């Protein structure tokens, strides 16, 4: 690889990549915008880009954009570089390039001379579009959430449903108020969402292998925890309609201590000119978004069987 300004960037790593489907990245980042002003932490590695957004230690979201989703991905670093960036500014800037990508790819480079994230596109009319986004020095390292913990028996309870069905259920639970309990039951096999606050509202998802609501269901013991409604709403409120239309599915897992993981699969479609390039995969490629939600209280909503 031939890099410019090697001496200035040797300590922070270097990235140059070409992205055809800017809309796919915009959709993914839009899904984790639950506040007007948010900063994201971007981590660069040989595997791709990971954007992390946190609200204290209660809610975390990660956007994974793997290197296979780029036309080219060139990366060199002694350690994995991280930088902060205004999420709103990044999404707004990327949006300005969407209408111009047509038959050319957007180039992303990091770092610039002043540690900026550099964006460049030359359109079909040979007009060059340049953008620079000032980055931030991370003040902390995101917490490493995981739903893989120590269990007395069996595996974490989890289920996967159509994304649109999950969003509709959480939207309907807004009026009761402050909290939502999520209960996964092995007998009968079902998932119960219950909103509590100004009133009570319960929504039941009965599992059946013959129905198309569920994509997967795994539960060997009953598990139930409460979560703040505003945190649950953040996991689905800003999912773009394009992702809901594809309906690839959303998976929810309750780990040890009640940590809830919500994972959405997103389709990153190739532009018409993609077949001219040697990608590792063809057709519709998939990335994903993860949310981690901490329970509203330390103890389970109901005792767990011994």
Image: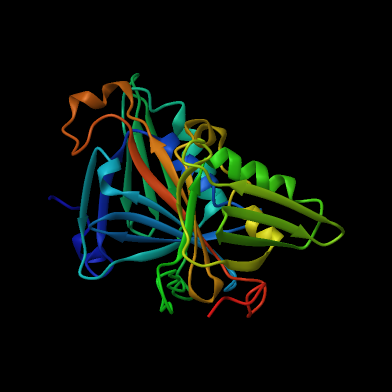
Indicate left or right for 56 with 228 as reference.
Answer: left
Q: Point out residue 196 in the picture as x, y percentages from the top left corner.
A: 78, 61
Q: How is the image coloured?
A: rainbow
Q: Point out residue 230 in the picture as x, y percentages from the top left corner.
A: 69, 59
Q: Residue furthest top?
A: 125
Q: Nearer the viewer, residue 143 or 203?
A: 203
Q: Point out residue 56 in the picture as x, y percentages from the top left corner.
A: 60, 72
Snapshot quadrant of residue 12: bottom left
- Residue appearing at x 81%, y 51% in the figure: 175
Q: Nearer the viewer, residue 131 or 26?
A: 26
The answer to whether any part of residue 35 appears in the image is: no
Count of residue discs: 0
- Residue appearing at x 75%, y 57% in the figure: 195
- Residue appearing at x 21%, y 55% in the figure: 75
Q: Point out residue 163 in the picture as x, y percentages from the top left corner.
A: 54, 41
User: Is residue 223 positioned above or below 159 on the image?
Assistant: below
Q: Residue furthest right?
A: 198
Q: Nearer the viewer, residue 104 or 112?
A: 104
Indicate left or right for 188 with 103 as reference.
Answer: right
Q: Residue furthest left?
A: 1
Indicate left or right for 86 with 14 as reference.
Answer: right
The answer to whether any part of residue 168 appears in the image is: yes
User: Is residue 260 positioned above or below 121 on the image?
Assistant: below
Snapshot quadrant of residue 129: top left
- Residue appearing at x 67%, y 76% in the figure: 297
Q: Nearer the viewer, residue 16 or 218?
A: 218
């Amino acid at each position: 690889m031939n890099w410019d300004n090697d001496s200035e960037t040797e300590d922070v790593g270097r990235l140059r990549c070409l992205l055809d489907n800017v809309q796919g990245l915009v959709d993914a980042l839009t899904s984790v915008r639950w506040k007007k002003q948010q900063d994201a932490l971007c981590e660069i590695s040989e595997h791709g880009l990971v954007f992390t957004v946190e609200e204290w230690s209660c809610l975390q979201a990660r956007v994974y954009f793997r290197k296979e989703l780029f036309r080219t991905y060139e990366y060199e670093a002694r350690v994995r570089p991280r930088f902060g960036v205004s999420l709103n500014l990044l999404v707004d800037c990327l949006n300005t390039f969407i209408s111009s990508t047509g038959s050319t790819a957007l180039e992303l480079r990091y770092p610039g001379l002043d540690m900026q994230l550099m964006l460049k596109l030359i359109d079909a009319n040979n007009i060059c579009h340049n953008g620079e986004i000032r980055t931030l020095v991370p003040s902390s390292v995101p917490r490493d959430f995981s739903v893989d913990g120590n269990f007395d028996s069996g595996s974490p309870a989890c289920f996967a449903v159509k994304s649109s069905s999950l969003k509709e259920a959480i939207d309907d639970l807004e009026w009761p108020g402050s909290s939502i309990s999520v209960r996964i039951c092995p007998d009968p096999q079902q998932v119960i969402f219950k909103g509590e606050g100004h009133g009570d509202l319960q929504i039941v998802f009965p599992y059946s292998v013959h129905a198309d609501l569920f994509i997967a269901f795994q539960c060997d013991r009953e598990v139930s925890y409460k979560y703040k409604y505003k945190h649950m709403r953040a996991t689905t409120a800003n999912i773009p309609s394009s992702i809901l239309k594809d309906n690839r599915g959303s998976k929810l897992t309750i780990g040890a201590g009640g940590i809830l993981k919500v994972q959405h699969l997103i389709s990153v479609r190739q532009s018409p000119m993609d077949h001219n390039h040697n990608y590792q995969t063809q057709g519709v490629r998939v990335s994903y978004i993860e949310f981690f939600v901490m329970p509203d209280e330390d103890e389970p909503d109901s005792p767990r069987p011994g």
